[in-house]
Amino acid sequence: MRAIPRFQAVVACAFTILVLVWALPALAERPPVHPSLRGAELPPLISAEAFFADQNQSWRYRVSSDGRKLVWIAYKNGKPTIHFSALDRKTIQTIDTEKPVYRAYWAHDSRRLVFYWDNDGDENYHLYIADTAHPERAPRDMTPLDGTTVWWHQAFRDDPAHMLVRLNARDPSEHDLYRLNIETGDLKRIVKNPGNGQGWVTDRAGKIIGRLRRTEGKRRILEVPEGTGWRTLIDWSFDENLQVLGHPLPGGTFLWVRSNRDRDRIVLARLDLQSGTEEVIYGHPDVDVDDVWIDNETYLPLFAQSWPDYMEFAYLDEDLGRDLERFRGNGPANIWLLSLSHDKQVMTLAVETERSASAYYLFDRRSKTKTLLAEQPIAQHRDTLSITRPVALTARDGLPLHGYLTLPRGVEARRLPTVLRVHGGPWARDKWGYVVADQFLANRGYAVLTVNYRGSTGYGRAFAQGARREFGRKMHDDLIDGVNWLIESGISDPDKIAIYGRSYGGYASMVGLTFTPEVFAAGINIVGVSDLVMALETFPPYWKPWIERWKTYVGDPNDPADRDDMAARSPINFIERIKRPLLLVQGANDVRVVRAHSDRIAETMKKAGLPFRYIVFKDEGHGIRKWQNRIELAHAMEQFLADHLGGRAGSPR
């Protein structure tokens, strides 16, 4: 625990397309054939169903604002469903819905519930309200407009019938700010997006005290009201980060922000609304401040979180820190504060290690009473799951890299079949904790390495900027350097390494198979980009605020030189180089990486007679969410990897 001094503040099943270029294996449990695994005392094989679809699991427990009720999601009749009850959970009720619900939030009236639906992954999210006083009534669609996406902005404790939302009803590429009455359904636009707006800053009463805009010079500005117009308070480049935290008290003179303006790493800072100056309150010495919890009542920060290797806290509220630390245990653990009642006396939290998915607790801070609400069923296997440890290596150009290594149990870490899993984004990062894919693969006998390649977040601005025009170049070199580190360490069999990823990770898998075709024994591409030009030309309209970042980092398709360079880094143009098998997976409704990316790969590989299997999930978007589909995908992956790496595989039920 890192403590910092107190300070004073003024303030149904999927449709699949199978291309059978090699014979599919028999659907029976398969022992490992890789030399390092034959005869090894591996732990019991855990079924794909246990990893991906145990229907007794529940998650996202949240306490109501008044501290008297709970809401959570649990399976009912095979579908994620809203459950709610009093704190004692003696009488549990449900809100039955047509489609799965994966998370729900209490309105400030501690009666209504808020959740979002899209249409099988198309990202046209609508906001719904369910009334716990009448759970038999169907939830009401509060934004019943076709082709729109709503984003939550603010709810009000003092006016629980209203909330502010951002909605692109007027223009698909621009979100305006609306006031929504959750009792009547009245939806009123209160301010129009000026055309280059990226959001508004509102105080706790909902008064607009600032707005965020893009400028022609590829910069962003925070403006504050002055007279009848606006005054620019600060500006920063899109490579810099500034996130306004929470909603200040009416009449407040500052904002809490996560910011790396004029510095490399993101810190917690106090931004003066008159001068625009920042006072650094807390910064981690090695990495970015990842998250900050702001108290809605006092507008004071309670803690900050960072991830150098394991999760670290900096507690600004020492009493809260002592309570959270009660849940740490004897070793590393991730502690997630999920909800806090208005009086800050009742909270829900999740505790996670790499070998146990989240255990959910209710904690009464007055009596110091812990109540275990649920533990994910996979926890029964914690003694046979694998340890994940942080690793550090150096890229060929001297750049320090960090990642995580998960090794299978019961076998010496020598010349193991290996999976390099590449995170998506690319503006994201891998963190220590329970990662279901890594544990699933390790249980099959594979070493699993993740590398936070240049461009990943969390390691400072310069590290992120290292990704400029390096898609398919140095970003890929970092991954290959990770592979070489594994081989040089003696951990991995150089002939049995697969590359696997989703989104950007899927792109990286295709780059691996086309640009370095001798390195990998197989590749798995899930909703990955194959054509950088097409990617930028088909992004959804509401990505407009971020398109300049993509153009700067990847290229501008409207610039002929850039277009040629993007084509040179697009795997679709080099499919004939592929020498190893590919498992290709796509959500039919994906609006971020449209289906054409995968269809073109499949068509080209089929014509060339290259080995691949193509699975299209008709009811998914940019990710595979439904448990039935996740099981199908897990079985496809384990059979595919058993064929080409030699690990073991379970039998579909």
Image: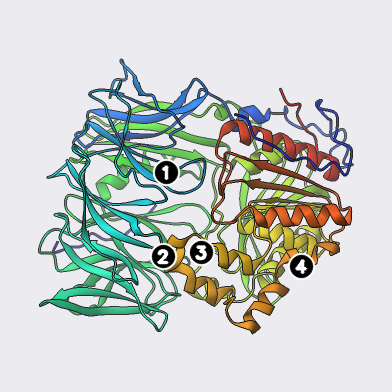
Residue 297 shown left or right of residue 398 in the figure? left
**How far apart, in angstroms, are the residues tagged by discs 4 and 1?**
45 Å
Q: Secondary structure at mark 1?
A: strand
Q: Secondary structure at mark 4?
A: helix
Question: Relative to 483, is 323 above or below?
Answer: above
Question: Relative to 627, is 272 above or below?
Answer: below
Disc 1 crowd, CA 10 A, few/some/many (<14, 14-19, 20+):
many
Residue hosting label 3: 457
Label 4 or label 1, whichever comes before in sequence order = 1
Q: Secondary structure at mark 3?
A: loop
Which labelled disc corresponds to residue 284? 2
- Residue 529, horizontal then vertical, whole percent: 65, 60
Marks 2 and 3: which is nearer the front?
A: 3
- Residue 473, horizontal then vertical, whole percent: 69, 73
Residue hosting label 1: 335
> Which residue reaches farthest top?
90
**How far apart, in angstroms, are the residues tagged by discs 2 and 1?**
18 Å
The amino acid sitting under disc 2 is His
Q: Are marks 2 and 3 in contact (CB under 8 Å)?
A: no
Label 2 or label 3, whichever comes before in sequence order = 2
Residue hosting label 4: 573
Relative depth, front residue between 553 and 453: 553
